[in-house]
Image: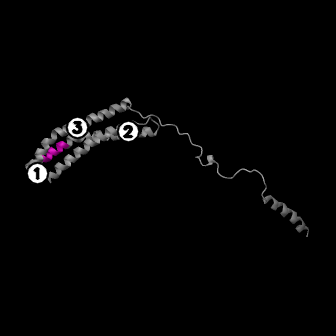
Amino acid sequence: MRISVLLVPVLGLSLSACAMQSGDFPSLAKRPYEDGPAIEEMVPPPPPEMTDLPAELGNAVSAAIRQSNTAHQAFLNNLSTVRQRVSAAQGAAPSSESWVVAQVELSSLEMDRSPSVSALADMDLLYRQRLSAELDGAQPGGAALIAESRDRIEGQVASQQREIEALQSRLR
């Protein structure tokens, strides 16, 4: 019985805590600033991109471009002669004199383009090295400048390859 006598006042006090009291209490609705983004992180602006390559790198890129342009010009100069030889050998039996002459001319055309292919490989190496340097914190933009020059050389090499493949297909 003692427990029930003590239990009644304790229950009464605990239930009274749940009763609504009158007064001015703050609203639990979201406030306008709660819908906004969390604290924004300050991201530093990217460093400016370079417009010119460092001297040593620029010289290497220029040398590769000159090498490819010279080789491409030699290729174009020799192309008409090779086309004539291939036309003369078209339909000829393999190992015939005209066929062999055309094959030799095609080989010389391959030799003419070899420096262009070498220049493209050099540009690939320069591009990879520059990308690596930029990833390590060097000023950005150099790889993009190299890529532009590399794309021009790659275009020359691709057009040379198409010409050679077209001529080879005429000899089969």
For the residues labelled 1 and 3, the Cα–Cα distance comes to 27 Å
Q: Position of residue 69 (x, y in %)?
A: 24, 36
Estimate how packed mark 2 is, as few (under 14), some (14 to 19) or many (20 or more) residues with alpha carbons within 10 Å. some
Hey, which residue is sitting farthest top in the picture?
55
- Between 85 and 51, the residue placed more toward the observer is 51
Q: Amino acid at mark 3?
A: Ala
Camera-side mark, 3 or 2: 2
Q: Position of residue 127 (x, y in %)?
A: 37, 39
Q: Secondary structure at mark 3?
A: helix
Magenta residues, dominant SS class: helix
Hey, which residue is sitting farthest bottom in the picture?
1
Quarter in which the C terminus is drawn: bottom left
In primary-sequence order, the first of circles 1 and 2 is 1
Hey, which residue is sitting farthest right in the picture?
2
In primary-sequence order, the first of circles 3 and 2 is 3
- Between 116 and 150, the residue placed more toward the observer is 150
What is the magenta range?
102-109
Q: Position of residue 19 (x, y in %)?
A: 79, 59
Q: Which residue is mark 2?
A: 144
Question: Residue at 90% of width from left, 67% of height from top?
Answer: 5
Question: Residue at 19% of width from left, 46% of height from top?
Answer: 163
Circles 3 and 2: CB distance less than 8 Å? no
From where the camera sits, is residue 122 visible? Answer: no
For the residues labelled 1 and 2, the Cα–Cα distance comes to 44 Å
Quarter in which the N terminus is drawn: bottom right
Q: Which residue is mark 3?
A: 71
Question: Residue at 11% of width from left, 45% of height from top?
Answer: 85
Q: Amino acid at mark 1?
A: Gln
Is 154 on the left or on the right of 28, as rendered? left
